């Protein structure tokens, strides 16, 4: 088990390095900011792009609109982001880091939670994140805006975190069962996101409650395996 968990740790480290590399490639196809002013300009451009993508969608947003919203020249935008794809990739990588930070907090807090609390936190994790980062949703759902390798990296990184959570919550779980269990939990978390659009609200809330109970039962079963 120790060897397998070390393998998962190595996977996480390699994935983080790939994400950092992807972020640099996506956002630094042009000039890299060297000073604080440059970093602030890049942050403003990303914030403007995020707002434009949410309001108009990925396909309808133009680089000219992003530059105007950021109060920057189009030449300045192209210096840092040569294409809209590079801009979207940098924004996705930025959002992904925020998602990873959220998952790291879940890992750190897992030892203090019982099964019911853990299931509730996991069910809310993706839904709450998507509400706070609406452009992440737009870009992930826009075909072609997220490189396939980047999408797979985010998915695998999330499973790394879930493996850590399950190893803490169910220490008796066989090492070979961690990854499949993480995949199941991940799909249940995605189901909670899908329920967000269901109407009426009372029906949606009832379904979310049942989904949380289903996850809690699954987590309890993992504890006893």
Image (spheres, rainbow, N blue to C red):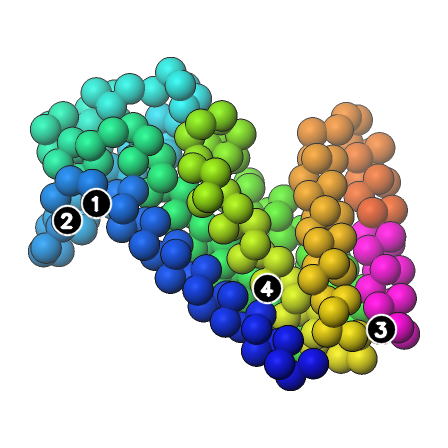
Q: Determine which residue is flagged by label 4.
A: 161
The residue sitting at the top extreme is 60
Q: Quadrant of the N terminus?
A: bottom right
Q: Determine which residue is flagged by label 2.
A: 32
Which structural element holds mark 3? helix
Mark 1 vs mark 3, CA separation in Å? 46 Å
- Give above or below for 6 relative to 222: below
Lateral position of residue 27 relative to residue 102, left or right: left
- Give above or below for 178 relative to 53: below
Which structural element holds mark 2? loop
Mark 4 vs mark 2, CA separation in Å? 31 Å
- Give above or below for 187 relative to 121: above
Residue 127 in the image: state x and y as whole percent: 63, 44
Q: Is residue 72 visible?
A: no
Q: Residue at x 46, y 32 (%)?
A: 139
Mark 2 vs mark 1, CA separation in Å? 6 Å
Q: Determine which residue is flagged by label 1.
A: 28
Magenta portion: prevailing SS class: helix
Lateral position of residue 46 relative to residue 176, left or right: left
Task: Report which quarter residue 196 is drawn in.
Answer: top right
Mark 2–mark 1 contact, CB under 8 Å? yes
Which structural element holds mark 1? loop
Mark 1 or mark 3: which comes first in sequence?
A: 1
- Mark 1 burial class by Cα count in 10 Å: few <14, some 14-19, many 20+: some
Mark 1 or mark 4: which comes first in sequence?
A: 1
Q: Determine which residue is flagged by label 3.
A: 223
Lateral position of residue 87 relative to residue 151, left or right: left
Residue 185 in the image: state x and y as whole percent: 74, 55
């Amino acid at each position: 088990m120790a060897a397998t968990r070390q393998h998962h740790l190595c996977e996480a480290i390699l994935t983080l390095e790939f994400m950092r590399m992807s972020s640099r490639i996506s956002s630094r196809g042009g000039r890299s900011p060297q000073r604080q002013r440059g970093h602030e300009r890049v942050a403003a451009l990303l914030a403007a792009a995020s707002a434009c993508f949410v309001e108009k969608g990925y396909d309808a947003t133009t680089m000219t609109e992003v530059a105007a919203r950021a109060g920057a020249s189009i030449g300045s935008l192209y210096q840092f982001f040569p294409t809209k794809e590079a801009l979207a990739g940098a924004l996705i990588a930025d959002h992904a880091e925020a998602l990873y930070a959220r998952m790291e907090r879940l890992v750190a807090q897992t030892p203090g939670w019982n099964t019911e609390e853990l299931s509730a936190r996991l069910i809310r994790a993706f839904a709450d994140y998507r509400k706070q980062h609406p452009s992440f949703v737009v870009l992930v759902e826009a075909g072609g805006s997220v490189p396939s390798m980047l999408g797979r990296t985010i998915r695998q990184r999330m499973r790394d975190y879930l493996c850590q959570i399950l190893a803490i919550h169910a220490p008796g779980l066989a090492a070979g069962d961690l990854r499949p269990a993480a995949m199941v939990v991940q799909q249940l978390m995605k189901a909670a996101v899908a329920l967000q659009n269901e109407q009426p609200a009372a029906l949606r809330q009832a379904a979310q409650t049942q989904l949380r109970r289903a996850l809690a039962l699954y987590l309890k079963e993992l504890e006893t395996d």
